[in-house]
Image (cartoon, rainbow, N blue to C red):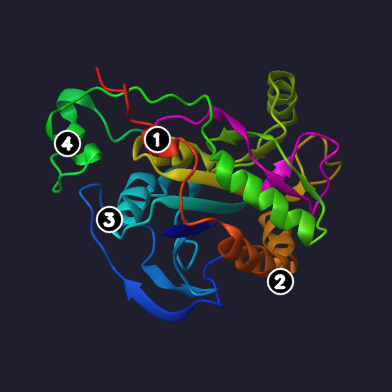
Amino acid sequence: MLAVIGGSGLYRIDQLEEVQEVRITTPFGEPSSPILIGKLRGKRVAFLARHGLNHQYSPSFVPYRANLWALKEIGANRVLSISAVGAINERFRPGDFVIIDDFLDFTKGREDTFYQGAYSLDVPGDDKPAELLKNKKVVHVDMSEAYCPQMRRCLMDVLEELKLSYHPSGVYACTEGPRFETPAEIRAIKILGGDVVGMTGYPEVALARELAMCYASLCVVANPAAGIAKYRLTSDEVISLMKSKEEEIKLILKLFVERLEDQRTCNCHRALEGAEV
């Protein structure tokens, strides 16, 4: 099953049918919102609001581990993240879509792994992640291809068909927030190869990998980043831009769900093979 995680300005999927609201508690706490499970184009799809239904979770305090674990528990094996970003690459314009293919992590102090060795939590279940946690294993997952190639290819096909302005690849730089970045920080990130900047892409992608879930990130450029923009950045601008892209996002989701093959032909499901020490 595909799960969609909505970022700033995206708190539900209106086109879901036969919707069931699921409230779940995990060993890692409660997820940031109830999970909505319904049908879209005849396929079961789940939705979770990353920041909560009332946007009550700051990027630093989103319960990332609870969110991903809860999605796993309801049977999701694929995750599509939709979020707003600032553009560092000057070819990227406000309103453009970006299909992320790599990331840089500049966060501080976030819980970014399930597997804490001797300090791992005891969890119910008998799948591979539960087994590793029960046995207090240290796990090192490979991140050479952190974003699912099958999902990324499908997103490209959908955006091409809809004739929307998009970039087929981009490096996401994740900063701690909640403040916006300084011009000096953006200059440094640009030197390191970052194309866009946001505050929530990590550890979400790594946690999905640790659960052998497919993960793809579709970003919407909300504004130029600090120092590139010649004006003061505001949250209002981000929410307004996401609101203006609402109909396009709906079209993308419908086609994406319809076109994505049920069978996983990528290697994401093998992420835990050879990872334990």
The image shows residue 218, relative to residue 197, as above or below, that is below
Instruction: Mark 3 or mark 1: name the one nearer the start of the chain.
Output: 3
Crowding near the residue tagged with mark 3, few <14, some 14–19, many ≥20 C-alpha atoms within 10 Å: few
Magenta span includes 102: yes
Q: Which residue is mark 3?
A: 73
Q: Nearer the viewer, mark 1 or mark 4?
A: 4
Q: Which residue is mark 1?
A: 110
Instruction: Mark 4 or mark 3: name the one nearer the start of the chain.
Output: 3
Residue 266 appears in the rendering: yes
Quadrant of the image occupied by residue 20:
bottom left
Q: Nearer the viewer, mark 3 or mark 1?
A: 3
Q: Magenta part of the protein: which range? A: 85-112
- For badge 3, the amino acid type reads Glu
Q: Secondary structure at mark 4?
A: helix
Q: Which residue is mark 4?
A: 131
Do the residues under discs 2 and 1 have CB atoms within 8 angstroms? Answer: no
Q: Position of residue 224 (x, y in %)?
A: 79, 43
